[in-house]
Image (cartoon, coloured by chain):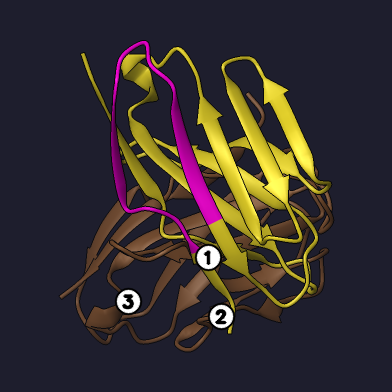
Amino acid sequence: GQNIDQPTEMTATEGAIVQINCTYQTSGFNGLFWYQQHAGEAPTFLSYNVLDGLEEKGRFSSFLSRSKGYSYLLLKELQMKDSASYLCAVMDSNYQLIWGAGTKLIIKP
Amino acid sequence: IAGITQAPTSQILAAGRRMTLRCTQDMRHNAMYWYRQDLGLGLRLIHYSNTAGTTGKGEVPDGYSVSRANTDDFPLTLASAVPSQTSVYFCASSDSTGGQPQHFGDGTRLSIL
């Protein structure tokens, strides 16, 4: 079967760095997406990786290793507004997104 | 402002009733999707449409139907609602089915009693 695993919840301190991991087993691979979802709101797109390596976008970076079925989202200089759930999703061989359950990130002052 | 509009925002419905959730996008995206999101689970795909006039079944299609008469609209119908369909429903669209990100509407919170 297809499976996306990510931690259920993480806590970090304002101003610090946090890494959210995602491991996957899917039928085929056509890219990995990270989304941010604030409570009660819609998911919003953060990043897309299809090749191995690190993609940097401001305070957020995303890494992919296809051979290991592994990705992480790195958030630097954490701000209170970064408190949200972070969703990992893999596009399978049918170009459908398989979603993880999300990691709830709690930022403490 | 370009985007996806879903209606209603929330609804309480008696079991056995028929309900249509509306979704309209003005970005001229080819692909559209319906997901449900339940606590502790990832988003699960109900139905999708790669282009106007075509639809396909996702992971959890039973009890739901869709149509795609034009590019902009993608309504989701529950023919006879059951309590297990209580969920938050998100409509999404993307420019293509490849590596393009999906853009989401604000969701419909549906409670079936």
Q: Answer yes or no: do the residues labelled 1 and 2 have beta carbons within 8 Å? A: no
Question: The chain coloured yellow carries which letter?
Answer: A
**Looking at this view, is B113 or B50 the one in front?**
B50
Q: Which residue is mark 2?
A: B59
Rendered position, A45 above or below A28: above
Q: Which residue is mark 3?
A: B85
**Looking at this view, is A48 or A43 the one in front?**
A48
The span from disc 1 to disc 2 (Cα, nearest Å) is: 15 Å
1 and 2 marks on the same chain: no
What amino acid does circle 2 point to? Glu
Instruction: For label 2, count other residues whose C-alpha is less than 10 Å away and answer few (under 14), some (14-19) or many (20+).
Output: few
Quarter holding the C terminus of chain B?
A: bottom left
User: Could you say which quadrant of the image residue A83 lies in?
Assistant: top left
Q: Marks 3 and 2: which is nearer the front?
A: 2
What amino acid does circle 1 point to? Ile
Q: Which residue is mark 1?
A: A4
Residue B14 pos. (x, y %): 19, 77
Q: Marks 1 and 2: which is nearer the front?
A: 1
Quarter holding the N terminus of chain B?
A: top right
Asked if residue B60 is among those painted magenta in the image, a careful observer would answer no
Q: Answer yes or no: do the residues labelled 3 and 2 have beta carbons within 8 Å? A: no
Question: The chain coloured brown carries which letter?
Answer: B
